[in-house]
Image: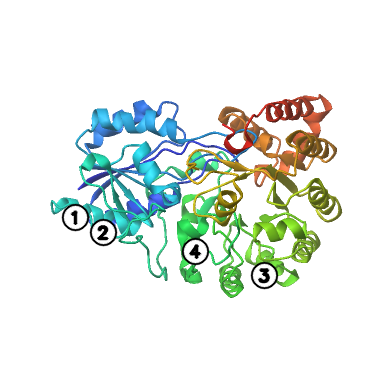
């Protein structure tokens, strides 16, 4: 079967993301004997035209559309991604390849499978992991049978027969899962995308060491996307993949696990294997969880080749940490900050403002922590408002307390902000704090045009500033503040937020 895989994700902040999930699906399809082509729209200036050309060139018998995100998860500057995907991709496919079944999958589909299936009027949705579900679907279609009994397959209305689903939108037949990763899980990205285009904009090579998350953070959908049980990759196979991509010019690798350091034994084994191989790469991770972080772990990571980290405590208030269900206390956040500062490990810190029970007192507690423990060489990001996703503990809280009605959809960007917080006072506080501390920023400042982002990153390289671009943002913020540009931008964001009539559905 001729299969066209399309990556429609054109978001470029903080950097354009390589489509690791869709690449795994493409590899699985190719290994199953299908003729696979790959259209990456990340850098496209005219997605509709590129889709039309790809269809004419490849003549697909099935199209697989990978959807990573529903929206940008940014309360200050919300953007819903699906209208563009519908108008620039799906409608073109329907016009130019009307007989080719359209299959949607990806992380976003695992969050809202039925809603995305209906919104895009797709023929099928894969709920679970596509490298299992899509080859099975292709096999069924080639045999001329509708796949009603296949795990993880939802059937669209256009196919004249709907598969019965649970109220959660999950198919009764269950999700499509890779039972054990073992030595599997390599994306073979070099086979499907042009790495150099991503490298030019500071994108690291993404790699998973595990899937699943055993934590129960109240707002998080990782459990729904990857399951609640850790499925671990063999550390030797992970490092094999890193070693292989260095031949393609990769020098910066990012581990994209939900939590890199949990379970701790697996992180230690991976660090030991990396230290043994001594590869010529810089390593980072987006998922350092303060639970279990101390001098020993940071030392393992430095010896393994880690040069930067991202840490996600979300708060430094005991009240807010408990409300978010983080599973650790403020003491762990302090211990993590001390260990990272002691090791001189540049870190991007993430804090989430607005959980149930959050007050200005708890906000100030987090700000005081940042002042006391986070060095000025680290970057701090404050996100205001929490995106509420279906199937999370936060959604249940919102329904039970009447924040959302029982039948209110959370498909489009929907938010929670503690009613004990005033939006104007909160954002004024965060804005003044960001101006006083050039290494602090608000989520409104992350929404910039792709063109500006490109020029900013090129500018950093031109003056000899290497490493991840975010390392140099404090200098940029300090510079633009001298001319009042940062103050004006933050003031405009505050005015915009003060005019929001309904924080629950800020569009």
Q: Which of 155 and 464 is in front in this view?
A: 155
* Badge 2 or badge 3: first in the primary sequence: 2
Mark 2 vs mark 1, foreground winner is 2
Quick check: can you spot residue 244?
Answer: no
How much space separates mark 4 and mark 3, taking CA atoms?
23 Å
Query: Residue beneath label 4, please?
Result: 212
- Residue 302 image offset from top left, x and y in percent: 68, 64
**Crowding near pointer 2: few (<14 within 10 Å), some, many (20+)?**
some
* Badge 1 or badge 4: first in the primary sequence: 1
**Left or right of 277, for residue 340:** right
How much space separates mark 2 and mark 4, taking CA atoms?
22 Å
For numbered disc 1, what is the local secondary structure? helix
**Crowding near pointer 3: few (<14 within 10 Å), some, many (20+)?**
some
**Crowding near pointer 4: few (<14 within 10 Å), some, many (20+)?**
some
For numbered disc 3, what is the local secondary structure? helix
Mark 1 vs mark 3, foreground winner is 1
- The reply to whether discs 2 and 1 touch (Cβ–Cβ < 8 Å) is yes
Q: How many numbered discs, if any? A: 4
For numbered disc 2, what is the local secondary structure? loop
Mark 2 vs mark 3, foreground winner is 2
- The reply to whether discs 2 and 3 touch (Cβ–Cβ < 8 Å) is no
Query: Residue beneath label 1, please?
Result: 140
Query: Residue beneath label 2, please?
Result: 150
How much space separates mark 2 and mark 1, taking CA atoms?
9 Å
Query: Residue beneath label 3, please?
Result: 300
Q: Nearer the viewer, residue 203 or 498?
A: 498
């Amino acid at each position: 079967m001729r299969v066209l895989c399309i990556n429609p994700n054109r978001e470029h902040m903080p950097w354009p993301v390589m489509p690791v999930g869709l690449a795994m699906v493409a590899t699985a399809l190719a290994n199953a004997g299908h003729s696979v082509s790959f259209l990456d729209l990340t850098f496209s200036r005219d997605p509709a035209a590129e889709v039309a050309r790809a269809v004419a060139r490849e003549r697909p018998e099935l199209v697989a559309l990978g959807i990573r995100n529903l929206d940008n998860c940014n309360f200050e500057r919300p953007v819903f991604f699906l209208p563009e995907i519908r108008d620039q991709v799906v409608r073109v496919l329907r016009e130019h390849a009307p007989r080719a079944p359209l299959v949607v999958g990806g992380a976003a589909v695992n969050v809202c499978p039925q809603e995305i299936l209906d919104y895009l009027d797709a023929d099928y949705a894969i709920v679970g992991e596509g490298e299992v579900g899509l080859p099975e679907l292709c096999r069924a279609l080639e045999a001329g049978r509708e796949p009603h009994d296949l795990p993880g397959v939802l059937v669209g209305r256009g196919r004249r027969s709907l598969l019965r689903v649970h109220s959660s939108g999950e198919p009764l037949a269950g999700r499509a899962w890779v039972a054990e990763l073992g030595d599997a899980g390599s994306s073979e990205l070099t086979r499907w995308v042009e790495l150099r285009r991503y490298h030019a904009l500071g994108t690291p090579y993404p790699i998973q060491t595990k899937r699943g998350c055993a934590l129960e953070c109240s707002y998080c959908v990782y459990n729904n996307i990857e399951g609640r049980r850790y499925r671990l990759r063999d550390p030797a196979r992970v490092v094999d993949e890193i070693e292989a991509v260095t031949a393609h010019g990769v020098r910066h690798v990012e581990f994209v696990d939900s939590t890199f350091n949990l379970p701790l034994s697996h992180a230690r084994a991976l660090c030991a294997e990396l230290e043994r191989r001594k590869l010529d790469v810089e390593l980072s991770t987006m998922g350092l969880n303060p639970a279990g972080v101390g001098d020993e772990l940071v030392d393992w990571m430095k010896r393994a080749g880690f040069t930067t980290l991202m840490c996600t405590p979300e708060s430094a208030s005991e009240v807010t940490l408990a409300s978010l269900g983080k599973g650790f206390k403020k003491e762990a956040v302090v211990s993590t900050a001390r260990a990272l500062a002691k090791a001189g490990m540049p870190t991007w810190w993430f804090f989430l403002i607005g959980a149930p029970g959050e007050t200005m007192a708890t906000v100030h507690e987090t700000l005081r922590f940042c002042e006391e423990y986070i060095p000025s060489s680290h970057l701090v990001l404050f996100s205001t408002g929490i995106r509420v996703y279906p199937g999370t503990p936060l959604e249940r809280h919102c329904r039970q307390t009447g924040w959302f009605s029982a039948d209110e959809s959370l498909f489009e960007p929907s938010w929670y902000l503690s009613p004990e917080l005033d939006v104007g006072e909160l954002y004024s506080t965060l804005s003044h704090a960001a101006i006083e501390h050039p290494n602090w920023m608000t989520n409104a400042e992350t929404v910039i045009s792709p063109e500006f982002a490109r020029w900013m990153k090129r500018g950093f390289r031109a003056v000899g500033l290497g490493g991840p671009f975010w390392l140099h943002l404090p200098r940029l913020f300090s510079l633009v503040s001298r001319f009042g540009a940062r103050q004006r931008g933050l003031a405009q964001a505050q005015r915009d937020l003060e005019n929001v009539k309904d924080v629950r559905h800020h569009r």
